[in-house]
Amino acid sequence: MTSKTLPDLVPDAALNLPRESERTLPNGLTVIAIRRSAVPLVEVRLRIPFGRAPLAPATLLSQALFTGTSGMSSIDLAAELQAVGGSLAAGLDPDRLLITGNALADGLDRTLELLAAVLTDATYPVEEVSTERERLADHIQVALSQPTHLARVALLKRMYGTHPYAVQTPSPDEVRGVEPDPLRELHAARLRPAGAVLVLVGDIDPDQAIDTAEKILGGWTGTAPDGGIPPAPALETGPLLLVDRPGSVQSSLRMALPGIPRTDPDYAALSLANFIFGGYFSSRWVENIREDKGYTYGSHSVIEHFVAGSALLAAAEVATEVTAPSLLETLYELGRIASLPPGEEELEQARRYALGTLRLGMSTQAGLAGLASMYAGFGLRLEHLREHSAALAAATREQVAAAAAKYLAPARAVTVVLGDADKIEPQLSALTAVERSAE
Amino acid sequence: MAPRIKIPATKYPVERFTLGNGLRVVLSPDRSAPVVGVAVVYDVGIRSEPEGRTGFAHLFEHLMFQGSENLEKLAHFRHVQGAGGSFNGSTHLDYTDYFEVLPSGGLERALFLEADRMRGPRLTEENLRNQVDVVKEEIRVNVLNRPYGGFPWLKLPPVMFKTFPNAHDGYGSFEDLESATVEDAQGFFDRYYACGNAVLSVAGDFDVAEATAMIERHFGDVPARPAPGLPDFAEPDVGEERRESYTDRIAPLPAVAAGYRVPDPIGAFDAYLPFSVLAEVLTDGDASRLVERLVQRDRTATTLGGYLGFMGDEYQVRNPTALLLQAHMPPGGDAGKVLQTIDEELDRLVTDGLKPGELARTQARMGTRLLHDTDAVLGRALPMAVLELQRGRPDLLNDLPKLISEVAEEQIVAAAATLRPERRASVEVIPGAGQ
């Protein structure tokens, strides 16, 4: 066997950001349009601030938005969209309502017309709302049988206490109590163009696409009350919260650590520290608990951003019998990155990954649309990627170590474990104070 | 109704050639974004694993990431991600794929990594035991610890099929996984992972001449080994209706999935294609027939799906395969009633044909989906590799929107007429949670 040498990388060309055309229309709607013509489609994202909307009606509204207008039934709407290769759907998080869809590029006008019809004239018909209400309640009931959902519910509650971010899914019964009238009222109050951002990406002429949007959506008017959410509270450390799921063959291990917004001067350094710890496959955490010990199929950590606060979340599903050893290794890896500087090579590897995945994320219409819309929700534009790339490229080993010491310290972690409590409580109690969830 | 919209096609260039050692290569350059996708597919999947070794094809896929001739364990991951890229692999019924997507400057590195493991992975007892543990956790995450795990892709085949290759659990039993040996793995590699049994494809930002030279440089000396004979997994159609059920201890609500055999996706492609459109006529969106009837009108289902191939890989699967319909139901839902309503709707389609505009709008939406998927470099590299492997026709990817748009109403009706209850196999999920 002759040994062969790994080929060198060809250095990346300079970051080439697509041109964003932008106009804020007289009705207060901001429209951003970007050309990427690789396939003859257009991606549509409409982000409407929705903070502090009542949870159960807001969630049902997102499911029932397309159930009818004064002129069209839900089936008419779906058929008309389909005729131009289109589809639209709405989703909710604590900050915003997001309408997502795409269509054949030639169908942009029709898609926006149908979107405008729904925005200005959704009727929430009694029958259709009742169907969607039952579907949503069933869907939530299924979610409540999924360990990943239950673990997230418990973690959010533990992290945010009484803050609006603490509960992000209504109960099935809360949904069943929502009538069409509150949906109509919520729609009238909150689905307003002022402060909303429409992103169009695809095989389009950006300026023409904005003209089209202005023509079609210009009749959508009004302002919404301030939906601003107070800053999320700092994490309060305490005993490990153990949530019982009898018969669970795995434990869902979750940790929350302090996060910072994308514009914070420490953000690039923290991003790199996060990759090195657990943010990608070649991280210490994955290499330890998966590739060395076989405790898990996968573990992952990510910095999650809401408008009113950011947090670093770490998650792994591990075999029940190795729950405590998995926690031990996780604490070890957090402790190691918080107290010792990373190696030069592992830092360079994480840096290249961070810079490379930025390029991958911008290489499709859908990726660009998602990025542009998400950034806009935080008051940023794609141009921010240039600044962020430069900060990633420049972050020093000392800065990464300092960010890790500050934000990844296990002493600052909030920990939740969902699993078969009778089997895992004794193991976990050997490592840390454990408190069983009362729910 | 607006005038019918034209479904556009893509014109991705496709270059094909075969190296001296038998490795088939597909290149599809497109310089619209500075990224490149690399895929290697091997012509072996779940259907080829031996009895007593369920789950072996997938376990072996994991072992292909555990080091190779010139690479230590962990090196593959680090080299791809350290080039700014991502990687993965997946095991299907008829093939196994390995792929990377990277900034274009990482192309040669990805080719090196794929060539190195094509020469031979490092198959050690330690790595095998480690990956058996990892795969068991994967099965717990995806099947055992969640509601509807393996439904219907693992649960319907044993109802529909009688022979081991088609019917068995492709994730594998823990007992079989634990009995796997390094010798098994070496034998599997020797038999199936020959370069004559593989296709390499590259899509995205590269120069064809440069990429060709790199491919020659890295893959040219992979020892030539012939492909094993292509097995025939054909078995007789379902002759009378088969209905089974099982209790899912975690699931809170009932569900049902039904499958009907369809024509050979490769040998009878013209007859197969209408079923692809039929599945969408029945289930794509609120204006589709079964959603309108079962979800909106009768409220006997809360979600519906319809697709070809147990893993949803409709153009990347061989015979025998099926059209699947699946429904999640509200509390107390009646699977028999759902199946009976499906029969009524199929009868209505066969008797009355399609409504004006129904076919065109379904085709338009299918066109959007196909085009959307090809926008990503891996959305070209992967299907082109499999289309080359199974059909010698990677450019079918460019033709699919047009071919879909040419399917005629009579073909849909004829396809629907074959979906008779006596040809159906179905499996019902009985909710075991909170009972």
Image: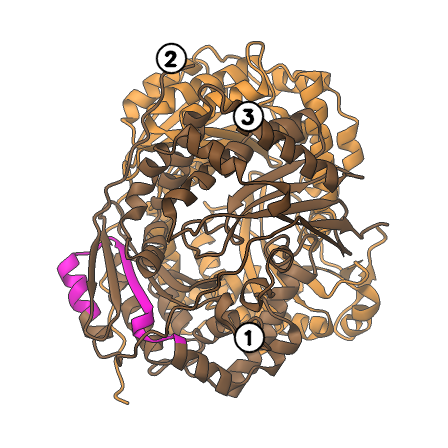
Chain colours: A orange, B brown
Disc 1 + disc 3, Cβ < 8 Å: no
Q: Residue at x 57, y 75 (%)?
A: B51
Q: Residue furthest left?
A: B209
Q: CA distance from mark 3 to mark 2?
A: 44 Å
Magenta stretch: includes residue A242: no
- Residue B185 in the image, given as x and y percentages of width and height: 48, 81
Which quadrant is the N terminus of chain A positioned in?
A: bottom left
**Camera-nearest label, 3 or 2:** 3
Position above or below: A413 against B192: above
B1 sits left or right of B301 in the view:
left
Q: Chain letter for mark 3, please.
A: B
Q: Classify 10 Å Cα crowding around label 2: few (below 14), some (14-19), many (20 and above).
A: some
A49 is higher (above) or lower (below) than B115: above
**Amino acid type at mark 1:** Asn
- Report the magenta residues as a range: B192-215
**Residue A67 shows up from this direction:** yes
Give the CA distance from mark 1 to mark 2.
56 Å
Q: Which residue is mark 3?
A: B351
* Tag 2 residue: A215
User: Residue type at mark 2?
Assistant: Lys
Spot occupied by residue A341 in the image (x, y as percentages of width and height): 47, 72
Q: How many marks?
A: 3
Q: Quadrant of residue A435?
A: bottom right
